[in-house]
Amino acid sequence: MAVTVSMPQLGETVTEGTILSWAKAVGDTIAEDEVLLEISTDKVDTEVPSPAAGVIQEILVGEGETVSVGTALAVIGEAGESSGDAPAGDAAPAPTVDVAEAAPPPPPPPTAADPVVEMAPAAEPAPAVAPAASADTTTVTMPQLGETVTEGTILSWAKAVGDTIAEDEVLLEISTDKVDTEVPSPAAGVIQEIL
């Protein structure tokens, strides 16, 4: 089944972004978490990993174009699926996967550079969230912020233990050797622990 990749929310106040470059072209095969494109916003330039493995069926926004958060950017289909098999127009749209919610590769064991925050969700957790230790918590792991980024430094926490947080509200700011970026919460709830 085809997956539609949408412009991610790359910070609480970011409303749009410009496509700097596509790492893949229509017809190319891509692996999950492989860099798909690079986006520039007023806060950050970042590489965006593919939320699924497959074949690039359509690129909907060209390089240099500026689009709003949530705008469909590309369609990725399963290998062997032709672009004619992808939904067109108003016919049964493909499921939309926000690249910010794409599952990152399994993180290494937690260290000071790899924070984990447990939260009690008020809504269903996003797919990027690692399986929680219990049904009542959501574990937030260090996101993959580019194909070559292996670690990050916590610059600041926007919330403290006991604070309530909404889904997509800024949880923390991370610095890597490539980018400084705000990380949104994948779920709504109460911060139970900062590790």
Image: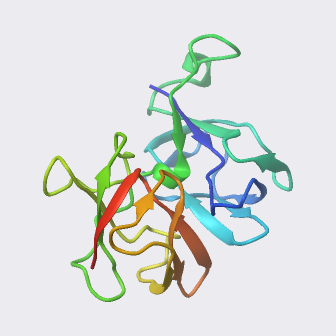
Residue at 53% over, 54% down: 168
Residue at 39% over, 60% down: 104
**Outermost left residue:** 134
Q: Along the horizontal axis of the image, is 65 left or right of 147?
A: right
Q: Is residue 118 above or below residue 63?
A: below
Q: Is residue 23 above or below residue 89?
A: below
Q: Along the horizontal axis of the image, is 146 left or right of 141?
A: right
The part of the image, by quadrant, that contains residue 79 is: top left
The part of the image, by quadrant, that contains residue 73 is: top right
Q: How is the image coloured?
A: rainbow
Q: Is residue 33 above or below residue 143?
A: above
Q: Is residue 56 above or below residue 171?
A: above
- Residue nearest the viewer, comparing 82 with 64: 64
Residue at 51% over, 45% down: 29
Residue at 39% over, 46% down: 126
Q: Where residue 151 appears, x then y in whole percent?
A: 41, 83
Q: How many marks?
A: 0
Q: Where residue 195 appears, x then y in whole percent?
A: 27, 79
Location of the N terminus (image quadrant): top left
Q: Along the horizontal axis of the image, is 143 left or right of 178?
A: left
Q: Where residue 23 appears, x then y in whole percent?
A: 64, 58
Q: Where residue 75 appears, x then y in whole percent?
A: 60, 35
- Residue nearest the viewer, comparing 174 with 23: 174
